Amino acid sequence: MTHTVSVTGLRKRFGATVALDGVDATFTPGVNGLLGPNGAGKTTMLRILATVLPADDGHLEALGVDPATAEGRLSVRRRLGYLPQEPGFHQHFSAFDFVDYVAILKEWVDRKARHDEVRRVLGLVGLEAVMHKRIRQLSGGMRRRVGIAQALLGSPDLLVLDEPTAGLDPEQRLRFRELLGTDAAGSTVLLSTHQTDDVAALCGHVIVLLHGQIRFTGTPVGLAALATDRVWLATDRDPRAELAWVTGEGRIRHIGEPPAGAHLVEPTVEDGYLVLAGRDAHAGEEAVAS
Ligand SMILES: Nc1ncnc2c1ncn2[C@@H]1O[C@H](COP(=O)(O)OP(=O)(O)OP(=O)(O)O)[C@@H](O)[C@H]1O
Ligand SMILES: [Mg+2]
């Protein structure tokens, strides 16, 4: 499959902070997930891909054009839907008026067609009943869904969604997964999340960013496989494990080098991610120790 987005040698710093430290990645149509701890550089990368923020260095190609040029930027923006991590809503607008306003900015000039589209995207996120309420009267999860709705206007070829499922209830998360599979089918979706079960359920391709660098790129199954033979359950906490936590069933789930005879379990995407992040944390400790 041809790449719709590719970045090479992407770098970005904010003063002394290196947010992106030479990122190379390619994305194809389908859902691409971005995982990483707080401050890893996910938002910075998505803002660059959404043409909101220029990179300091490196090359970006999106939908066949170079957004470093004014023409390229315009052409990408016309085919882009973007949900920022913290959208600045006009709180006194109703959900309908806000999405309608974004649609006007997106050059939907015909009023009737535009209003139909605004109702369609608000329907996709289940906000029909409250679309005429002011945004400030909506719950946090509903506001998130207004943000998702505006990104879906016109079924864009490129959808950049920064933590779209943060704050959504379980039913709305399922609905979101389904709409990506139907309404966004054929587009290239780049989303960041802290929810590894979203990655397992949604993403064909996942990348893990740690300290502004890519540490994993592959499938969710491949990420989970990093923890193969390294996850076990026991009744008591094993102090030799790298990580251990109590499960809902009251047993202790461990990650690390299992002791002989340990009750090994099938790893999840979260386990794979934790193995990677743990390795990174240990590398940091060694660096401090030496
Ligand atoms: N506008 C800014 N000015 C200064 N520093 C910034 C700015 N934006 C990001 N940073 C820094 O860049 C680094 C990466 O931030 P970024 O927001 O990309 O992380 P993230 O992976 O999205 O984290 P989170 O999971 O918390 O959303 C952090 O150290 C952050 O403090
Ligand atoms: Mg972020």
Image (cartoon, rainbow, N blue to C red):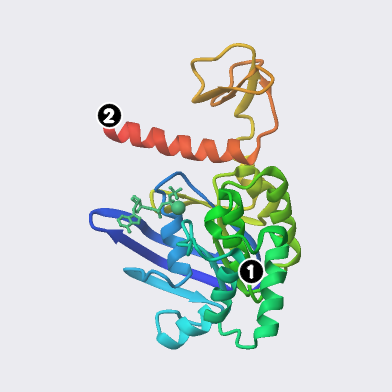
Name the residue rendered at 54%, 71% in the picture.
5
Viewer-side residue, 47 vs 290: 47
Q: Quadrant of residue 203?
A: bottom right
Viewer-side residue, 166 vs 72: 166
Q: Is residue 137 visible?
A: yes
Q: Which mark is residue 229?
A: none
Residue 26: x %, y % from top left: 54, 66
Instruction: Label 2, secondary structure: give it.
Output: helix
Residue marked by disc 1: 152
Q: Left or right: 171 with respect to 40?
A: right
Measure the C-alpha gap from mark 2 to mark 1. 49 Å
Give, as a three-letter code, the residue at label 1.
Leu
Work out whether 162 lies above or below 121: above
Instruction: Label 1, secondary structure: give it.
Output: helix
Q: Left or right: 265 with respect to 196?
A: right
Quarter occupied by the C terminus: top left
Residue marked by disc 2: 289
